[in-house]
Amino acid sequence: MANPLHPAAIHHLPPFVTAPGETDVLFIVMAVFVLLAVIGIGIFYFKLHALPEQMAHRGQKIQFELVAVLALLALFTHNHAFWIAGLLLAFVPLPDFTTPLSSMARALERIADGAGPAAPPRAPAPGQTVPNVTAPDADQPTESREV
């Protein structure tokens, strides 16, 4: 004999209510959807979090390192000010200070060694011979040309 329904129960059940002992398909579909949504939002968060580093990658090395440190600080402290600072630093190109400073250092080393600055080449006087600039072979003598 079939169990009679309670008098307060409705006679027609909605389709998402499963019978006892059957598989709840809606629960399984929603569990998979929530799992994929959490993974997708996490991937989006990490991609968005790495955006300043990707933008600074084409810049200078020191700029990239500063932006990477700010991004890591923002990730571990959950302080968005670090992320915004890293994003702004990635947008602004830093001026190149190292090239002029290194050339000044090389020039000062040459002066300290006694070599002094290299003198510019002078033009030969009319009738003077100028040695050939090409590298001579070991078996051929050096040639001179007249100007």
Image (cartoon, helix red, strand yellow):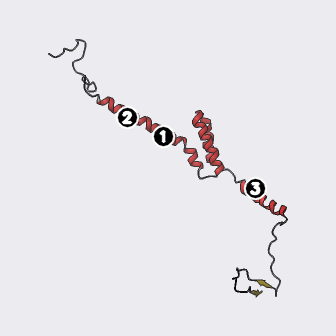
Residue at far left of view: 1
Mark toward the start of the polypeptide (1 vs 2): 2
List the residue tagged with mark 3.
Answer: 101
Q: Is residue 4 left or right of residue 129?
A: left
Q: Residue at x 70, y 79 (%)?
A: 135
Instruction: Indicate the secondary structure of the residue bearing disc 2.
Output: helix
Q: Residue at x 25, y 24 (%)?
A: 21
How many C-alpha atoms fall within 10 Å of the one at disc 3: few (<14), some, or many (≥20)?
few
Measure the alpha-carbon separation of dots 1 and 3.
42 Å
Q: Position of residue 104 (x, y in %)?
A: 78, 58
Q: Is residue 95 above or below residue 44?
A: below
List the residue tagged with mark 2.
Answer: 33
Q: Position of residue 137 (x, y in %)?
A: 69, 83
Q: Nearer the viewer, residue 55 or 142?
A: 142
Mark toward the start of the polypeptide (2 vs 3): 2
Measure the alpha-carbon separation of dots 2 and 3.
58 Å
Q: Is residue 135 above or below residue 83?
A: below
Residue 44 - label: 1
Q: Residue at x 57, y 37 (%)?
A: 75
How many C-alpha atoms fall within 10 Å of the one at disc 1: few (<14), some, or many (≥20)?
few
Quadrant for residue 30, please give it: top left
Q: Residue at x 55, y 43 (%)?
A: 50
Q: Position of residue 31 (x, y in %)?
A: 36, 31
